């Protein structure tokens, strides 16, 4: 990570309704809250009739805030607040850097990339939907400590016993996934029966824990948790992860070389998770299973992977080739270069080629 030292000052802009309001303040950074102009799904929703007014008000708020802050560079990662903030920056002539986390760029970043000084992408697939010669393939910024734990140390940290046995981790995201929980509950006995030593770590989500606990039998090889704080330990301990296909999760799976069966959520904007899962599958690092096929195919898909060690090894090797762990330092260096008024010619010369 590039050290940020005085006179560099980093401030964040977000909303009070989401996690960043607490997380940024807890990390010791300055935080500014704006009103989010959310786009409703489906697009024909009557609530979208109010979108132009909400967007205009957010743009006015962002314009005033940037005029007061006078930032040397603005970085956007997509989303409801990013769009008016980055648009205000572009209209004021401020340097703009975009970081696209998904394989399929969202509406906000597809528009904003046209005004950006630089665009950093996490998946090669995103380059074809962004303006020519601006996409730099870096992967997503990762949390510190990923890939540093040994399997034995990770399993001990998670409260698993010593020994040589497979570990299956079920991850529904920070809030949990109802469809995934339902399918796992229906197949739990069969999953545990795939191997006499198989241990299952099942992250249910806080709101689903009580219902899941009441619907399945306890088992000494089953560990139910509402939320996992040490994802580094999970990736290091697991032989296979069954997970949603959020952008950061996919990048973490690549960096930690963790084989995965990805079940993309069909309920996210522009079906980003499906595109992420397909991009992961194309590298050979993961297998993709649609939510519509989850009930029928979860057990056979998990069984075919866990019983094929050669394929799991090939998936790990593919992940190692595709994963990039230094995105944060690369992006930080570029942002500091631009903020310091150094010409970013070296970044322009390394742009991802367009096809």
Image (tube, helix red, strand yellow):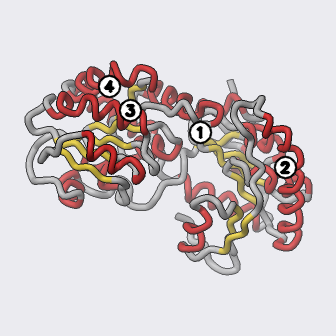
Say whether disc 4 or disc 2 marks the residue closer to the N-terminus.
2
Select label 3 or label 1 by which is in front. Answer: 1
Q: Which mark is residue 102?
A: 1
Q: Quadrant of residue 129?
A: top right
Looking at the image, residue 68 lies above or below residue 335: below
Q: Residue 129 vs residue 205: left or right? A: right
Q: Where is residue 89 in the image (x, y as percent from the top left)?
A: 84, 57
State the CA–CA distance, disc 4 to disc 2: 42 Å
Q: Which mark is residue 232?
A: none
Select label 2 or label 3 by which is in front. Answer: 2
Asked whether disc 4 touches disc 3, contact meaning CB atoms under 8 Å apart, the reply is no
Q: Which mark is residue 318?
A: 3
Q: What element carries label 3?
A: helix
Q: Is mark 1 on a helix, strand or loop?
A: loop
State the CA–CA distance, disc 1 to disc 2: 23 Å
Q: Residue at x 69, y 75 (%)?
A: 9
Residue 228 in sight from this viewpoint: yes
Q: State the residue position of label 2.
A: 55
Select label 1 or label 2 by which is in front. Answer: 2
Q: Position of residue 231 (x, y in %)?
A: 36, 54
């Amino acid at each position: 990570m590039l050290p940020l030292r005085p006179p560099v000052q980093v401030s964040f802009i977000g909303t009070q309704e989401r996690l960043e309001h607490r997380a940024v303040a807890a990390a010791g950074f300055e935080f500014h809250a704006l009103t989010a102009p959310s786009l409703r799904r489906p697009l024909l929703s009557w609530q979208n009739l109010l979108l132009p007014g909400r967007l205009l008000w957010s743009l006015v708020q962002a314009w005033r805030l940037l005029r007061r802050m006078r930032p040397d560079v603005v970085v956007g990662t997509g989303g409801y607040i990013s769009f008016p903030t980055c648009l205000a920056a572009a209209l004021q002539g401020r340097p703009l850097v975009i970081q696209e986390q998904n394989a399929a760029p969202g509406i906000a970043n597809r528009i904003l990339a046209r005004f950006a000084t630089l665009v950093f992408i996490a998946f090669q697939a995103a380059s074809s939907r962004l303006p020519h010669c601006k996409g730099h393939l870096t992967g997503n910024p990762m949390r510190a400590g990923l890939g540093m734990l040994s399997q034995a140390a990770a399993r001990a940290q998670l409260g698993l016993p010593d020994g040589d046995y497979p570990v299956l981790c079920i991850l529904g995201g920070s809030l949990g996934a109802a469809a995934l929980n339902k399918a796992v509950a229906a197949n739990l006995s069969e999953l545990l029966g795939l191997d006499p030593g198989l241990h299952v770590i099942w992250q249910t989500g806080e709101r689903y824990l009580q219902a899941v606990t009441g619907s399945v039998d306890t088992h000494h090889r089953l560990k139910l948790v509402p939320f996992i704080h040490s994802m580094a330990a999970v990736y290091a301990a697991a032989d296979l992860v069954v997970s949603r296909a959020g952008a950061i999760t996919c990048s973490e799976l690549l960096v930690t070389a963790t084989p995965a069966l990805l079940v993309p959520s069909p309920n996210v904007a522009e079906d980003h998770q499906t595109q992420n899962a397909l991009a992961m599958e194309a590298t050979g690092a993961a297998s993709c299973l649609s939510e519509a096929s989850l009930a029928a195919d979860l057990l056979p898909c998990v069984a075919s992977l866990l019983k094929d060690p050669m394929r799991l090894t090939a998936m790990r090797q593919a992940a190692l080739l595709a994963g990039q762990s230094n995105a944060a330092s690369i992006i930080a260096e570029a942002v500091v270069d631009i903020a310091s008024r150094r010409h970013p010619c070296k970044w322009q010369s390394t742009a991802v080629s367009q096809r």
